[in-house]
Amino acid sequence: MSAAPTAKRTVIVAGGGIGGMAAAIGLSRAGCKVTVLERAAEFGEIGAGIQLGPNVFHALKTLGVAERTLENAVYIDKLIMMDGMTGDKVAEIPVDAPFREHFRNPYAVIHRADLHAPLHAVNVADPDVTLLPRHEVTGFVKRAGRVEVHTANGASFTGDALVGCDGVRSKVREAIVGDGDPKVSGHIAYRAVLPIEEMPEDLRWNAACLWAGPKCHMVHYPLRGWKLFNIVATFHHPSRTTEGHNEPGDRDELLSYFVHLPAKPRSILEKSRNWRRWVLVDREPVGNWSDGNVTLLGDAAHPTLQYFAQGACMAIEDAVTLMHEVTASPDDLGGAFRRYQDRRITRTARIVLSSRELGRLYHAAGVERLVRNEILGGKTPADFYRSLDWIYGYGRDAAGP
Ligand SMILES: Cc1cc2nc3c(=O)[nH]c(=O)nc-3n(C[C@H](O)[C@H](O)[C@H](O)COP(=O)(O)OP(=O)(O)OC[C@H]3O[C@@H](n4cnc5c(N)ncnc54)[C@H](O)[C@@H]3O)c2cc1C
């Protein structure tokens, strides 16, 4: 064990999303003073839902926010895949009591604001954390073992280290990985929330339900004490080569990709309003995302397509690993960052690469669709638990990630 440091280390966190908030809690618990620089005028999250696998609750427990998060979550009973052509059920993964026992935590769905808020509240109450909105990081300079971070409003901040949690178009990544723009996938996602009264009654399932393909899929699940349903509809648009992030959606464009969907699930898309549109991107996994006392976390380090519903879960797991490594060597933040990334690279890269494959399965057409249905339809819950163990079982047998 290293000796206790003489003074608290100061760490600057770029970005105050889910990853940045979790990182700030972890770094403060590891004995650092933390300043979070966020570009937006307020700390918060977009008005959509998010799925949380059991693996993330081990991490949220370690950060002390699992209980508050679960208070606002809906515990679903199943993950269901429906065939988007015939309306038949393809497969079902129960995530009820035996699943919770197996993975020692629930599978839950939650409004993003209800995930971000408890993390934010811990930081607001922590005298060692300073939260600064309206501070867009534009770059940094390393000087005499420290890092000077610059923001668009002309301010600068000097710390012992910098953690880039500034998302898929990270400024910090630009300087230490330098791999240019993210990779446009050719997939576009539309998001909306629908009041429960407008959801067809016989589709108000306590499940994350996915209507699959061809070349598209739609997901729905209940949110916020069953007052809302979260709707995400994704389709191939290979000619769309420019990024787009949280733009206003075009309902007619969306509907034109789901003409084959049976009338009832299609009515969900017809009724939803206020669509927002994302052109989905990821990046090739890299074998290094740190440079001495500067590192990356969450989407800045390993952005992924959303098909395993694990991007935010990975960011929160990252934060706990970072906390453990900084606790182990608070006087050697560069060493801690190196060990942190080495512990996270394979797992997060596997999520990125596997998500691409899963997207192909969701969007299968023609004979590939028939093969998919036969393979998934023949699996038992035990088969699914085994094949998902690498994701959901993580942290189950230890104190956390
Ligand atoms: C359609 C869709 C569905 C998804 N569903 C799920 C799901 O069900 N489960 C799941 O776990 N994940 C899901 N994800 C992934 C998840 O949303 C992300 O992985 C997660 O939000 C990443 O968090 P982050 O904090 O790393 O990055 P971000 O959420 O991108 O946060 C980055 C923060 O940094 C700020 N910022 C950016 N640039 C700067 C700058 N230069 N200076 C200062 N601040 C800056 C931003 O304003 C933002 O607050 C989904 C993603 C999509 C697109």
Image (cartoon, rainbow, N blue to C red):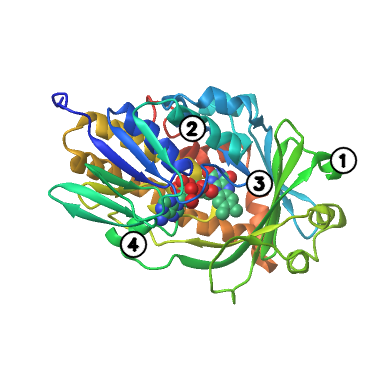
Q: CA distance from mark 2 to mark 3?
A: 40 Å
Sequence order check, earlier mark of 1 and 2: 2
| 109 horizontally vs 36: left or right | right
Label 1 sits on residue: 201
Question: What residue is shown with label 2?
Answer: 119
Q: CB of mark 4 within 8 Å of CB of mark 2?
A: no
Mark 1 vs mark 2, CA separation in Å = 34 Å
User: Looking at the image, which residue is at 73% across and 66% down?
Assistant: 250
Nearest-to-viewer mark from 3 and 4: 4
Tell me the distance, in whole angstroms, between the alpha carbons under discs 1 and 4. 48 Å
Q: Residues within 10 Å of mark 3 (few under 14, many from 20)?
A: few
Q: Amino acid at mark 3?
A: Gly
Circle 4 residue: 174
Look at the numbered disc 4 and give the secondary structure of its residue.
helix
Q: Is residue 104 above or below residue 359?
A: above
Ligand 1 is within 8 Å of the C-beta of the residue at disc 1 = no
